Image (cartoon, rainbow, N blue to C red):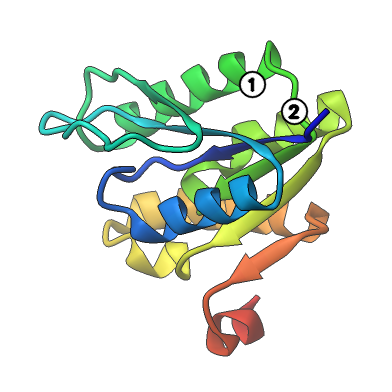
C-alpha cells in the first residue's frame, strides 16, 4: 500500500511548474499524490497527469475573502481525507494544513517558495501574514526554502 501525500497550493497549478515537478517526484517515489489548488477564471485544462488534482471554485479572485474561502475549503476537505503527509506550499496554505496535521497527527512539510510576507504589498495584509507566520513557524518541524538567504531569515 503506497503512502498518501496531499499537496496544497493557492497559485495556478497549471502554470506552477515547481509544484508539478514536486508532485511528479512524489509519484515516482511511490506516493499516491493528490494536488489541491484553486480554480481561476482562465483555468486551462491540465494534461493527463500521473496524480490526482482537485481545484476548488472560489467566487473571489483576490484579496482577503479569496484566502478565507480557499483556506476554509481546504480545512474541511483535509479534515475528511486520509494522508500520511501534508505538503503546504507557501504561507497562504499553511494554516489549514497545520491545524489538520495537529488534529490527525500527520506529518506536515512547509514548502516556502518565497519569503512570503515580503511579497505582500499592503501593510495591513502584511502584518496579518507576519503574525500568522510568527505564530506557526516556531511550531514547524519540516521546512523547505528555495535558497540560503531565505533560510537565514527564517
CA neighbours of label 1 inside 10 A, class few (<14), some (14 to 19), many (20+)? many
Residue on which disc 1 sits: 78
- Looking at the image, is 95 positioned above or below residue 133? above
7 vs 132: above or below: above
- Where is residue 126? Give x, y as percent: 40, 57
- Where residue 111 sits, quadrant-wise, is bottom right
The residue beneath circle 2 is: 83
- Element on which disc 1 rests: helix
Q: Residue at x 53, y 58 (%)?
A: 130
For the residue labelled by badge 2, is the local secondary structure a helix, a strand or a loop? loop
Contact (Cβ within 8 Å) of mark 2 with mark 1: yes
The N terminus: image quadrant: top right
Measured as percent of width and height from the top left, residue 91 is found at 52, 51
User: Residue at 52% of width from left, 39% of height from top?
Assistant: 8
Closer to the camera in the image, 48 or 76: 48
Q: Nearer the viewer, residue 12 or 66?
A: 12
Viewed as shown, does residue 91 lie left or right of 69? right
Residue 128 location (% of width, % of height): 48, 48
> Can residue 135 be spotted in the picture?
no
Q: Which mark is residue 125?
A: none
How many marks overall? 2
Amino acid at each position: 500500500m503506497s503512502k498518501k501525500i496531499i499537496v496544497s497550493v493557492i497559485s495556478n497549478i497549471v502554470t506552477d511548474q515547481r509544484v508539478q515537478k514536486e508532485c511528479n517526484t512524489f509519484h515516482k517515489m511511490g506516493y499516491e499524490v493528490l494536488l489541491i489548488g484553486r480554480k481561476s477564471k482562465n483555468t486551462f485544462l491540465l494534461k493527463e497527469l500521473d496524480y490526482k488534482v482537485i481545484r476548488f471554485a472560489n467566487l473571489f479572485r483576490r484579496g482577503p475573502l479569496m484566502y478565507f474561502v480557499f483556506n476554509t475549503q481546504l480545512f474541511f476537505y483535509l479534515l475528511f481525507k486520509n494522508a500520511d503527509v501534508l505538503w503546504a506550499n507557501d504561507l497562504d496554505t499553511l494554516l489549514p494544513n497545520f491545524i489538520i496535521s495537529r488534529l490527525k497527527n500527520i506529518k506536515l512539510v512547509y514548502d516556502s517558495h518565497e519569503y512570503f510576507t515580503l511579497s505582500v504589498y499592503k501593510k495591513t495584509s502584511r502584518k496579518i501574514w507576519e503574525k500568522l507566520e510568527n505564530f506557526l513557524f516556531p511550531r514547524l518541524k519540516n521546512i523547505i526554502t528555495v535558497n540560503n538567504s531565505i533560510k537565514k531569515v527564517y
